[in-house]
Image: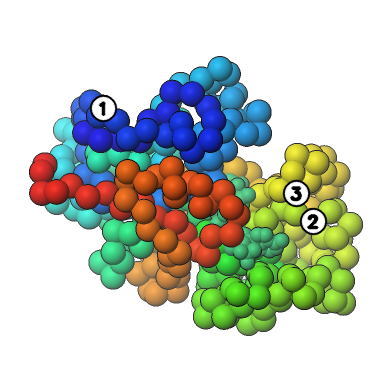
Amino acid sequence: MKAIVYTTYGSPDVLKLNDVEKPTLKDNEVLVKVHAASANPLNWHLMRAEPFLARLENGLLKPKNMKLGADVAGRVEGVGRNVTQFQAGDEVFGSMPLNELGTFAEYLCALEDALALKPARLTFEQAAAVPLAAFTALQGLRDKGQIQPGQKVLINGASGGVGTFAVQIAKSYGTEVTGVCSTRNLDLVRSIGADHVIDYTQEDFTRNGQHYDLIFDAVGNRSISDYQRALSPNGICSVAGFTSLSRLFQVMFLGGKKIGLMQTAKANKKDLVIIQELLEAGKVVPVIDRSYPLSEVPEAIRYLETGHARGKVVITVEHNNKT
Ligand SMILES: NC(=O)c1ccc[n+]([C@@H]2O[C@H](COP(=O)([O-])OP(=O)(O)OC[C@H]3O[C@@H](n4cnc5c(N)ncnc54)[C@H](OP(=O)(O)O)[C@@H]3O)[C@@H](O)[C@H]2O)c1
Protein backbone atom coordinates (compact mmCIF):
# COMPACT_ATOMS: atom_id res chain seq x y z
CA MET A 1 0.00 0.00 0.00
CA LYS A 2 0.99 3.64 -0.26
CA ALA A 3 1.86 5.60 2.88
CA ILE A 4 3.67 8.78 3.79
CA VAL A 5 6.92 7.93 5.58
CA TYR A 6 9.88 9.92 6.88
CA THR A 7 13.22 8.45 7.86
CA THR A 8 14.88 11.64 9.02
CA TYR A 9 13.74 14.81 10.75
CA GLY A 10 13.39 18.00 8.72
CA SER A 11 11.19 20.16 6.50
CA PRO A 12 8.15 18.74 4.64
CA ASP A 13 10.65 17.57 1.96
CA VAL A 14 11.48 14.58 4.21
CA LEU A 15 7.94 13.24 3.72
CA LYS A 16 7.82 10.61 0.95
CA LEU A 17 4.96 8.67 -0.54
CA ASN A 18 6.32 5.11 -0.46
CA ASP A 19 5.12 1.56 -0.99
CA VAL A 20 5.02 -0.16 2.40
CA GLU A 21 3.60 -3.40 3.79
CA LYS A 22 -0.15 -3.34 4.32
CA PRO A 23 -0.63 -3.75 8.09
CA THR A 24 -1.70 -7.15 9.34
CA LEU A 25 -4.66 -7.39 11.63
CA LYS A 26 -4.24 -8.49 15.26
CA ASP A 27 -7.07 -10.11 17.22
CA ASN A 28 -8.04 -6.88 18.97
CA GLU A 29 -7.72 -4.60 15.96
CA VAL A 30 -9.83 -3.16 13.18
CA LEU A 31 -8.43 -2.85 9.63
CA VAL A 32 -9.58 0.47 8.17
CA LYS A 33 -9.46 1.39 4.51
CA VAL A 34 -8.57 5.05 4.90
CA HIS A 35 -10.66 7.52 2.92
CA ALA A 36 -9.52 10.70 4.65
CA ALA A 37 -7.11 11.93 7.30
CA SER A 38 -6.33 15.39 8.60
CA ALA A 39 -3.26 17.43 9.38
CA ASN A 40 -2.49 18.79 12.84
CA PRO A 41 0.44 20.87 14.13
CA LEU A 42 1.49 17.66 15.93
CA ASN A 43 2.54 16.33 12.53
CA TRP A 44 5.04 19.08 11.86
CA HIS A 45 6.31 19.13 15.46
CA LEU A 46 7.19 15.44 15.05
CA MET A 47 8.41 15.82 11.46
CA ARG A 48 10.82 18.63 12.40
CA ALA A 49 11.48 17.32 15.92
CA GLU A 50 10.62 20.81 17.15
CA PRO A 51 10.70 21.65 19.93
CA PHE A 52 13.59 19.32 20.81
CA LEU A 53 11.36 17.51 23.34
CA ALA A 54 9.60 15.89 20.35
CA ARG A 55 12.72 13.69 20.05
CA LEU A 56 11.92 12.14 23.42
CA GLU A 57 8.60 11.14 21.95
CA ASN A 58 9.79 9.61 18.68
CA GLY A 59 13.54 8.97 18.71
CA LEU A 60 16.59 11.10 19.52
CA LEU A 61 18.38 10.89 16.17
CA LYS A 62 15.72 9.65 13.75
CA PRO A 63 12.02 8.84 13.90
CA LYS A 64 11.18 5.47 15.48
CA ASN A 65 7.67 5.51 14.04
CA MET A 66 8.23 6.62 10.45
CA LYS A 67 4.54 7.15 9.74
CA LEU A 68 2.50 10.27 10.47
CA GLY A 69 -1.15 11.22 10.80
CA ALA A 70 -3.45 10.94 13.82
CA ASP A 71 -6.96 11.50 12.50
CA VAL A 72 -8.74 9.05 10.24
CA ALA A 73 -12.07 8.34 8.60
CA GLY A 74 -12.69 5.27 6.49
CA ARG A 75 -14.44 1.98 6.03
CA VAL A 76 -13.83 -1.15 8.09
CA GLU A 77 -12.31 -3.80 5.86
CA GLY A 78 -11.84 -6.50 8.48
CA VAL A 79 -11.90 -7.08 12.22
CA GLY A 80 -9.81 -9.23 14.56
CA ARG A 81 -11.53 -12.11 16.32
CA ASN A 82 -11.84 -10.24 19.66
CA VAL A 83 -13.42 -7.12 18.16
CA THR A 84 -17.05 -6.66 19.19
CA GLN A 85 -17.98 -3.09 18.27
CA PHE A 86 -17.43 -3.07 14.50
CA GLN A 87 -17.87 -5.19 11.42
CA ALA A 88 -16.68 -5.06 7.84
CA GLY A 89 -18.36 -2.25 5.92
CA ASP A 90 -18.86 0.08 8.91
CA GLU A 91 -17.92 3.70 8.29
CA VAL A 92 -15.74 4.89 11.16
CA PHE A 93 -13.66 7.82 12.35
CA GLY A 94 -11.17 8.30 15.14
CA SER A 95 -7.72 9.29 16.25
CA MET A 96 -4.56 7.26 16.84
CA PRO A 97 -2.52 7.64 20.03
CA LEU A 98 0.85 9.37 19.72
CA ASN A 99 2.87 6.15 19.51
CA GLU A 100 0.71 4.68 16.75
CA LEU A 101 0.38 7.49 14.23
CA GLY A 102 0.01 6.43 10.61
CA THR A 103 -3.23 7.62 9.08
CA PHE A 104 -1.46 9.20 6.07
CA ALA A 105 -1.77 5.80 4.41
CA GLU A 106 -4.19 3.68 2.41
CA TYR A 107 -4.82 1.27 5.30
CA LEU A 108 -4.51 1.37 9.05
CA CYS A 109 -4.95 -1.08 11.93
CA ALA A 110 -6.51 0.50 15.01
CA LEU A 111 -7.73 -0.64 18.41
CA GLU A 112 -11.51 -0.58 18.43
CA ASP A 113 -11.59 1.99 21.24
CA ALA A 114 -9.78 4.46 18.97
CA LEU A 115 -12.78 4.46 16.62
CA ALA A 116 -16.48 5.29 16.57
CA LEU A 117 -19.12 5.06 13.87
CA LYS A 118 -18.96 8.03 11.53
CA PRO A 119 -22.08 10.19 11.80
CA ALA A 120 -24.01 9.59 8.56
CA ARG A 121 -24.46 13.32 7.96
CA LEU A 122 -20.71 13.80 7.64
CA THR A 123 -18.51 12.97 4.66
CA PHE A 124 -15.27 11.08 5.28
CA GLU A 125 -13.38 14.36 4.83
CA GLN A 126 -15.52 16.13 7.41
CA ALA A 127 -15.23 13.26 9.89
CA ALA A 128 -11.45 13.05 9.50
CA ALA A 129 -11.21 16.77 10.25
CA VAL A 130 -12.61 16.29 13.74
CA PRO A 131 -10.92 14.03 16.29
CA LEU A 132 -7.64 15.50 17.56
CA ALA A 133 -8.68 19.14 17.22
CA ALA A 134 -12.03 18.45 18.88
CA PHE A 135 -10.40 16.41 21.69
CA THR A 136 -8.09 19.37 22.30
CA ALA A 137 -10.96 21.85 22.39
CA LEU A 138 -13.16 19.64 24.58
CA GLN A 139 -10.46 18.64 27.03
CA GLY A 140 -8.99 22.15 27.17
CA LEU A 141 -12.36 23.76 27.89
CA ARG A 142 -13.72 21.07 30.20
CA ASP A 143 -10.77 19.61 32.10
CA LYS A 144 -8.34 22.48 32.54
CA GLY A 145 -10.94 25.19 31.85
CA GLN A 146 -13.76 23.81 34.07
CA ILE A 147 -16.29 25.34 31.67
CA GLN A 148 -19.76 26.07 33.13
CA PRO A 149 -23.03 27.23 31.53
CA GLY A 150 -23.55 30.98 31.56
CA GLN A 151 -19.85 31.81 31.63
CA LYS A 152 -18.18 34.40 29.44
CA VAL A 153 -15.65 32.43 27.41
CA LEU A 154 -12.97 33.82 25.10
CA ILE A 155 -11.33 31.67 22.43
CA ASN A 156 -8.03 33.01 21.10
CA GLY A 157 -7.28 31.55 17.66
CA ALA A 158 -10.98 30.98 17.02
CA SER A 159 -10.55 30.45 13.26
CA GLY A 160 -7.98 27.63 13.40
CA GLY A 161 -8.28 23.86 13.51
CA VAL A 162 -8.74 23.74 17.28
CA GLY A 163 -10.41 27.14 17.62
CA THR A 164 -13.31 26.38 15.28
CA PHE A 165 -14.19 23.37 17.44
CA ALA A 166 -13.60 25.32 20.66
CA VAL A 167 -16.12 28.01 19.66
CA GLN A 168 -18.79 25.41 18.89
CA ILE A 169 -18.11 23.18 21.89
CA ALA A 170 -18.11 26.19 24.24
CA LYS A 171 -21.49 27.22 22.78
CA SER A 172 -22.80 23.69 23.36
CA TYR A 173 -22.12 24.24 27.09
CA GLY A 174 -24.44 27.26 27.06
CA THR A 175 -21.75 29.92 27.37
CA GLU A 176 -21.37 33.38 25.86
CA VAL A 177 -18.48 33.06 23.44
CA THR A 178 -16.08 35.68 22.12
CA GLY A 179 -13.81 34.57 19.28
CA VAL A 180 -10.52 36.28 18.50
CA CYS A 181 -9.28 36.11 14.90
CA SER A 182 -8.02 38.31 12.08
CA THR A 183 -10.19 40.51 9.85
CA ARG A 184 -10.68 37.98 7.06
CA ASN A 185 -12.03 35.36 9.49
CA LEU A 186 -14.56 37.47 11.43
CA ASP A 187 -17.55 36.24 9.40
CA LEU A 188 -16.42 32.62 9.64
CA VAL A 189 -16.14 32.80 13.43
CA ARG A 190 -19.55 34.48 13.70
CA SER A 191 -21.03 31.82 11.41
CA ILE A 192 -20.00 28.97 13.73
CA GLY A 193 -21.80 30.57 16.66
CA ALA A 194 -19.55 33.10 18.35
CA ASP A 195 -21.66 35.77 20.08
CA HIS A 196 -18.88 38.34 19.74
CA VAL A 197 -15.77 38.56 17.61
CA ILE A 198 -12.60 40.54 18.15
CA ASP A 199 -10.25 41.35 15.27
CA TYR A 200 -6.81 40.97 16.77
CA THR A 201 -5.33 43.27 14.11
CA GLN A 202 -7.55 46.10 15.43
CA GLU A 203 -8.09 45.39 19.10
CA ASP A 204 -6.17 43.74 21.94
CA PHE A 205 -8.57 41.54 23.92
CA THR A 206 -6.44 41.97 27.01
CA ARG A 207 -6.75 45.75 26.95
CA ASN A 208 -10.38 46.48 26.12
CA GLY A 209 -11.76 46.42 29.66
CA GLN A 210 -13.63 43.11 29.20
CA HIS A 211 -13.16 40.19 31.60
CA TYR A 212 -13.74 36.50 30.93
CA ASP A 213 -14.49 33.56 33.21
CA LEU A 214 -12.58 31.28 30.88
CA ILE A 215 -9.94 31.99 28.25
CA PHE A 216 -9.03 29.10 25.98
CA ASP A 217 -5.91 30.03 24.07
CA ALA A 218 -5.31 27.97 20.93
CA VAL A 219 -2.46 30.27 19.87
CA GLY A 220 -0.36 30.74 23.00
CA ASN A 221 1.10 34.11 22.08
CA ARG A 222 0.25 36.10 25.21
CA SER A 223 2.06 36.78 28.50
CA ILE A 224 0.84 35.80 31.95
CA SER A 225 0.08 39.45 32.75
CA ASP A 226 -2.02 39.71 29.56
CA TYR A 227 -4.12 36.74 30.69
CA GLN A 228 -4.41 38.13 34.23
CA ARG A 229 -5.72 41.43 32.89
CA ALA A 230 -8.42 39.74 30.81
CA LEU A 231 -9.60 37.21 33.41
CA SER A 232 -12.42 37.79 35.88
CA PRO A 233 -11.36 37.36 39.54
CA ASN A 234 -12.03 33.60 39.57
CA GLY A 235 -11.32 33.12 35.89
CA ILE A 236 -9.29 30.27 34.42
CA CYS A 237 -7.01 30.34 31.40
CA SER A 238 -6.38 27.07 29.58
CA VAL A 239 -3.56 27.26 27.06
CA ALA A 240 -3.33 24.70 24.23
CA GLY A 241 -0.53 26.04 22.05
CA PHE A 242 2.58 28.17 22.20
CA THR A 243 4.33 30.45 19.74
CA SER A 244 7.77 30.33 21.41
CA LEU A 245 9.56 28.32 24.09
CA SER A 246 9.60 31.34 26.37
CA ARG A 247 5.78 31.58 26.16
CA LEU A 248 5.56 27.85 26.85
CA PHE A 249 7.82 27.98 29.91
CA GLN A 250 6.08 31.10 31.26
CA VAL A 251 2.71 29.38 31.16
CA MET A 252 4.13 26.12 32.54
CA PHE A 253 5.98 27.63 35.48
CA LEU A 254 4.60 31.10 36.22
CA GLY A 255 0.87 30.81 35.61
CA GLY A 256 -0.12 29.71 39.11
CA LYS A 257 -3.32 27.72 39.66
CA LYS A 258 -5.54 29.67 37.28
CA ILE A 259 -3.39 30.02 34.19
CA GLY A 260 -1.77 26.96 32.72
CA LEU A 261 -1.20 24.53 29.90
CA MET A 262 -3.92 22.02 29.32
CA GLN A 263 -2.70 18.45 29.46
CA THR A 264 -1.77 17.07 26.06
CA ALA A 265 -5.03 16.07 24.42
CA LYS A 266 -5.66 12.35 24.69
CA ALA A 267 -7.66 10.26 22.27
CA ASN A 268 -10.19 8.22 24.25
CA LYS A 269 -13.46 6.47 23.50
CA LYS A 270 -15.58 8.38 26.02
CA ASP A 271 -14.74 11.76 24.53
CA LEU A 272 -14.99 10.42 20.99
CA VAL A 273 -18.58 9.43 21.75
CA ILE A 274 -19.31 12.89 23.22
CA ILE A 275 -17.96 14.45 20.04
CA GLN A 276 -19.85 11.97 17.86
CA GLU A 277 -23.08 13.04 19.60
CA LEU A 278 -22.33 16.74 19.11
CA LEU A 279 -21.73 16.06 15.41
CA GLU A 280 -24.90 14.00 15.07
CA ALA A 281 -26.93 16.75 16.74
CA GLY A 282 -25.43 19.32 14.36
CA LYS A 283 -24.07 21.27 17.36
CA VAL A 284 -20.57 20.93 15.95
CA VAL A 285 -19.89 21.20 12.23
CA PRO A 286 -16.31 20.79 11.00
CA VAL A 287 -14.82 23.73 9.13
CA ILE A 288 -12.58 22.59 6.30
CA ASP A 289 -10.12 24.98 4.76
CA ARG A 290 -8.43 22.84 2.10
CA SER A 291 -8.10 19.23 0.99
CA TYR A 292 -4.96 17.65 -0.44
CA PRO A 293 -4.50 14.17 -1.90
CA LEU A 294 -2.24 11.70 -0.05
CA SER A 295 0.63 12.39 -2.47
CA GLU A 296 0.52 16.07 -1.48
CA VAL A 297 0.85 15.67 2.30
CA PRO A 298 4.11 17.71 2.18
CA GLU A 299 2.18 20.65 0.66
CA ALA A 300 -0.59 20.23 3.23
CA ILE A 301 1.90 20.37 6.10
CA ARG A 302 3.70 23.31 4.50
CA TYR A 303 0.39 25.18 4.38
CA LEU A 304 -0.50 24.27 7.98
CA GLU A 305 2.91 25.51 9.09
CA THR A 306 2.03 29.03 7.94
CA GLY A 307 -0.15 29.19 11.08
CA HIS A 308 -3.06 30.71 9.16
CA ALA A 309 -5.30 27.78 8.24
CA ARG A 310 -9.03 28.53 8.45
CA GLY A 311 -10.40 25.44 10.15
CA LYS A 312 -8.89 22.12 9.18
CA VAL A 313 -6.57 20.87 6.47
CA VAL A 314 -7.75 17.50 5.21
CA ILE A 315 -5.99 14.69 3.33
CA THR A 316 -8.06 12.60 0.93
CA VAL A 317 -7.04 9.04 0.05
CA GLU A 318 -8.08 7.70 -3.36
CA HIS A 319 -8.14 3.94 -3.89
CA ASN A 320 -8.79 3.75 -7.63
CA ASN A 321 -11.22 0.87 -7.01
CA LYS A 322 -8.44 -1.51 -5.97
CA THR A 323 -8.86 -3.23 -2.62
N1 LIG B 1 -2.19 20.70 23.92
C1 LIG B 1 -2.54 19.82 23.00
O1 LIG B 1 -2.79 18.64 23.27
C2 LIG B 1 -2.71 20.29 21.58
C3 LIG B 1 -3.39 19.52 20.65
C4 LIG B 1 -3.59 20.04 19.36
C5 LIG B 1 -3.05 21.28 19.05
N2 LIG B 1 -2.33 21.96 19.97
C6 LIG B 1 -1.76 23.27 19.67
O2 LIG B 1 -2.82 24.19 19.55
C7 LIG B 1 -2.43 25.21 18.64
C8 LIG B 1 -3.55 25.41 17.64
O3 LIG B 1 -3.66 24.26 16.82
P1 LIG B 1 -4.52 24.36 15.49
O4 LIG B 1 -4.64 23.00 14.94
O5 LIG B 1 -5.72 25.17 15.76
O6 LIG B 1 -3.51 25.23 14.59
P2 LIG B 1 -3.85 26.01 13.28
O7 LIG B 1 -5.04 25.44 12.61
O8 LIG B 1 -2.56 26.11 12.53
O9 LIG B 1 -4.23 27.48 13.81
C9 LIG B 1 -4.19 28.49 12.90
C10 LIG B 1 -5.08 29.63 13.36
O10 LIG B 1 -4.40 30.44 14.32
C11 LIG B 1 -4.85 31.78 14.12
N3 LIG B 1 -3.90 32.77 14.61
C12 LIG B 1 -2.62 32.95 14.21
N4 LIG B 1 -2.09 34.00 14.88
C13 LIG B 1 -3.05 34.49 15.70
C14 LIG B 1 -3.12 35.55 16.65
N5 LIG B 1 -2.07 36.35 16.87
N6 LIG B 1 -4.27 35.74 17.32
C15 LIG B 1 -5.34 34.95 17.11
N7 LIG B 1 -5.35 33.93 16.22
C16 LIG B 1 -4.21 33.70 15.52
C17 LIG B 1 -4.96 31.88 12.62
O11 LIG B 1 -5.90 32.90 12.30
P3 LIG B 1 -5.50 34.09 11.30
O12 LIG B 1 -5.15 33.45 9.99
O13 LIG B 1 -6.74 34.90 11.28
O14 LIG B 1 -4.31 34.77 11.92
C18 LIG B 1 -5.44 30.50 12.18
O15 LIG B 1 -6.84 30.47 11.99
C19 LIG B 1 -1.09 24.78 18.04
O16 LIG B 1 -0.07 25.47 18.72
C20 LIG B 1 -1.02 23.31 18.36
O17 LIG B 1 0.32 22.85 18.47
C21 LIG B 1 -2.16 21.51 21.22
- Numbered label tally: 3
Q: Residue at x 53, y 71 (%)?
A: 168
Q: Residue at x 58, y 30 (%)?
A: 49
Is 61 on the left-hand or right-hand side of 147? left
Q: Residue at x 31, y 66 (%)?
A: 122
- Give x and y (percent) for residue 281: 38, 73
Q: Residue at x 65, y 29 (%)?
A: 53
Residue tagged by mark 3? 260
- Give x and y (percent) for residue 6: 42, 28
Vertical relation: 225 (above or below) 51: below
* Callout in the foreground (2, 3): 2
Q: Quadrant of ligand 1?
A: bottom right
Vertical relation: 257 (above or below) 61: below
- Give x and y (percent) for residue 249: 79, 39
Q: Amino acid at mark 1?
A: Val
Distance between the alpha carbons at the discs numbered 2 and 3:
12 Å
Mark 2–mark 3 contact, CB under 8 Å?
no
Residue 296, can we see it?
Answer: yes
Task: Point out the residue furthest to the front here.
Answer: 13
Question: Along the line of sight, which residue is nearer the eye, 12 or 310?
Answer: 12
State the SS at label 2.
Answer: loop
